[in-house]
Amino acid sequence: MRRTKRLLTLTLFATAATAGAQGNLTFVCGAQADWCQVVANAYKKETGGEAKFLRLSAGESLARLRAEKANPSFDVLFGGTGDVHEAGTKEKLLTFYKPKAWNELYPELRQQVKDAYIPLYTGALGMAVNDTVLKKRNLPAPTDWPDLGDPKYKGLVAMPNPNTSGTAYTMITTLIQIYGEDKAFDLLKKIHNNVPRNGYTRPGSGAAFLAARGEVAVGVTFLHDAVAQNVRGFPVRAVAPKAGTGTEIGGVSLVTNGPNPAAGKQFIDFVLKPETQKLAATVESFQIQSNAKTPVAAASPNLDKIKLIDYDFGKWGDSATRARIISRWTKEVFPLPRR
């Protein structure tokens, strides 16, 4: 009897260990690191599986997936702007997986991305404005995109670098859709002249952080990142440009030929549950979550009160288009001397 009990106990431990191992995965975190951590902790608590992650900005995520195409080390791409998910799917770096909660996701989000990837959240682009800095300079707050190119804001504008940031790419393509490509690049050159040496950040949230710390007066960022800084007690507010602004539909995608696809699918199903999506607001990530059953955090920007353009996710998510636009900015805008 004792031997039988021992064998039964060992079998149970072995089964539990195997189940945990099968649920282990590694994911690229294209969202805020603290959000990824709280999700990873919750995943382990519910499934017993380990979810390890590496924080990379959108552009870095795509570069890493391309570099590892023959032998991926990740199972899931969690977060990051839609252009990366669109490009990754078209390049077969990512594989579309229809999750269990598919029909619970906002239909308009699914329609906008044309079922190319799984929507995880959405948010609108805009500015983080530090009125304290502006008041010291006796300057008015900018209200629209052209204001950012006004010489009176010399050295006071921060924005992310499109070579690493999906936020910056969304900004550039938003300007193109509003003003046309050549006029948009003329404006980007004027904005560049107002960006200080340390004003180009790797992640999009970095520009909001510089504005929050008072290193600049304005940071181009997603509005939920500006709200997050305000909630943390910094003197910044979110401003949506009057001419209109673009949106992101951040995604979650299965990496093609990842080391543990079964765990990857399990993780995707887990992060789309309302109970999991609610965790974002607990770490001050105020995007609108994709599951219609997930309550919208009180601090989240109200997209119904913002003038949104009809952002073409398919067109601007195309790999060749994305590469061309970023290359043009890198060649024509970034090297220009600040006058």
Image: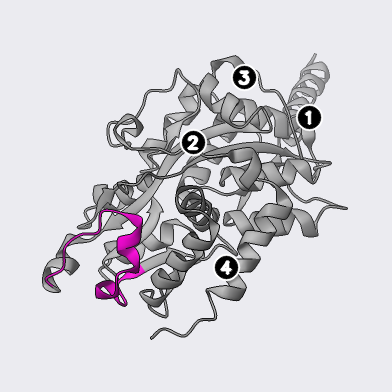
Circle 1: residue type: Ala
**Which mark is nearer the camera, 1 or 4?**
4
Secondary element type, mark 4: helix
Q: Nearer the viewer, mark 2 or mark 3?
A: 2
For mark 1, give the secondary structure: helix
Q: Residues within 10 Å of mark 4 (few under 14, many from 20)?
A: some
Query: Position of 173 compared to 118: left or right?
Result: left
Reading the chain from its start, which is encountered first: label 2 or label 1?
Answer: 1
Snapshot colouring: one colour
At 77% from the left and 25% from the top, the residue drawn is: 15
Label 1 environment density (alpha carbons within 10 Å; few <14, some 14–19, many ≥20): few
Query: Which residue lies at the image location 37% right of the left edge and 44% below the top edge?
Result: 244
Local crowd at mark 2 within 10 Å, few (<14), some, or many (≥20)? Answer: some
Taking the image as shown, residue 145 lies to the left or right of residue 180, namely left
Residue on which the image places disc 1: 14
Disc 3 secondary structure class: helix
Work out whether residue 273 can be spotted. yes
The numbered disc on residue 310 is: 2
Tell me what residue is drawn at x 59 percent, y 38 percent. 251
Asked whether 8 or 123 is in front, the reply is 123
- Indicate the amino acid at tag 4: Trp
* Residue 324's disc number: none
Q: Nearer the viewer, residue 246 or 190?
A: 190
Q: Is residue 4 above or below residue 82?
A: above
For residue 102, the mark is 3
- Comes first in the chain, label 2 or label 3: 3
Which amino acid type corresponds to the residue marked 3 in the rendered image?
Trp
Q: Tell me how far mark 2 sits from mark 3, CA to CA.
A: 23 Å
| Separation of marks 2 and 1 at Cα, in angstroms | 53 Å
Disc 4 marks which residue? 329
